[in-house]
Amino acid sequence: MTCRFNPFNPDAPKAFDAIVGRGLAAASRWLEKAVGTAEWARRFDAMDRRFMPERDLPLISFETQWSLLDMAVKGRAYPNVAEVLNDEAKASLKNDARLVFEKLARSRVLFVQVTEPNEGLPYYTMQNVFNPEEEFLYVDFGDQEPLDRGALMVGRFLAHENCIYVIPGVFVGTAAVLGLIMDAIVEFLDEESDQVEEAMQGALPEIWNLCAAIQDEYDGVGLGGGGAEGDSLLEDPCRVSFMLDADKEEAVVALRRHPFFSEVDPLEFGFDPMGESLFDVYVLPMSGPPMASFEDEEDEDEALGGEEAPVRVGSVSVTADKLSISALNPVEMELLKALVLQLVACSEA
């Protein structure tokens, strides 16, 4: 840890943190071009659904990137992506970006626990829960809330020697739920104990949600009246429901006509009057400040023809008598709710 060439050296500048952040942003832009905007959006939406109700967009994006890179590394798809990772002569990215790509492609989903907080030092000694003989140094670059001895972390980590760096979007839990989470993961994966770690690699969304649900239940999050039997869960602040004042057919037709709404798995003819009709909502993002590029990296906006790709901001579900809106945050909820109520006649549920 004292070697000045070790990117995890706590005394070194935050160059590693900055390079990884830029590298992950470059990965998203480059992969979208490599596989095509439509394919990227399809895979992003599929990953989004796996993480629901968690709606952390960076986390969803990083896991989508990993899934594409993992397929390329294993030779199952995207040979153009594999070329960048494996053939420097043909690579269109500079060394820093390629190294981040390679680290992300070979990153690991880990379930770790703090065994030594190392007070006064910006790193923690962590133990692999499913392989207790494996220890790591988890370096905190200042973005993590202080962790106590026994604290749990589940997420995707970049590994270098015996050091780990977490991709943003990690689950942090308490030691009190360790056994419950271990049992839930093993039951969900339905694998022998020596195969659990391997099976975890492609199941981060489901495992993340398992962990969050167990911790929330233990903490009483979302329970009314102190969690007494019969109390109901509080409504998600980013989800709201209305009673339909129009026929379902009118509601579905109105949403189909609006360019922001994209129906998920629509029937070839008509609609299901008793089932659920689901729409994803897409908008064009507002322009933001330019992202710093790696040295000699080609201009991303020029490569994409200067066009912004639509961004998913929420969804609308229509059943026989109810309309429900989900949004990624309260601000987008208010904007989306105002739009939907202009299109469809509804009343408070």
Image (cartoon, rainbow, N blue to C red):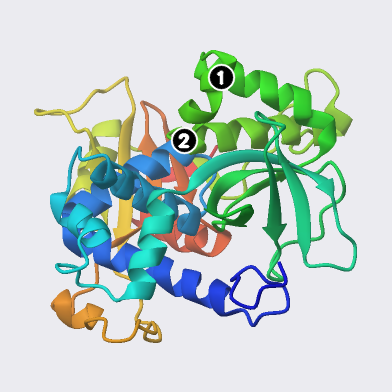
Q: What amino acid is labelled 1 in the image?
A: Asp
Which residue occupies 74% across, 35% down?
215
Residue ID for mark 2: 201
Q: Decide if residue 57 is on the left or right side of residue 98.
A: right
What is the residue that sits farthest to the left in this orientation? 269
Q: Decide if residue 91 is on the left or right side of residue 62.
A: left
Question: Vertically, is 29 above or below 294?
Answer: above
Q: Earlier in the sequence, mark 2 or mark 1?
A: 1
In what quadrant of the picture does the C terminus appear? top right
Within 10 Å of disc 1 (Cα), the crowding (few <14, some 14-19, many 20+) is few
Q: Report the mark closest to the observer, 2 or 1.
A: 1
Q: Position of residue 245 (x, y in %)?
A: 39, 38
Q: Element type at marker 1?
A: helix
Quadrant of res 311: bottom left
Question: Vertically, is 261 above or below 111?
Answer: below
* Residue at mark 2 to residue at mark 1: CA–CA distance: 14 Å
Residue ID for mark 1: 194
Which residue occupies 64% across, 21% down?
184
Within 10 Å of disc 2 (Cα), the crowding (few <14, some 14-19, many 20+) is some
Which residue occupies 39% across, 74% down?
96
Q: Is residue 255 visible?
A: no
Quadrant of res 29: bottom left
Q: Is residue 63 visible?
A: yes
The residue closer to the viewer here, 298 or 129, is: 129
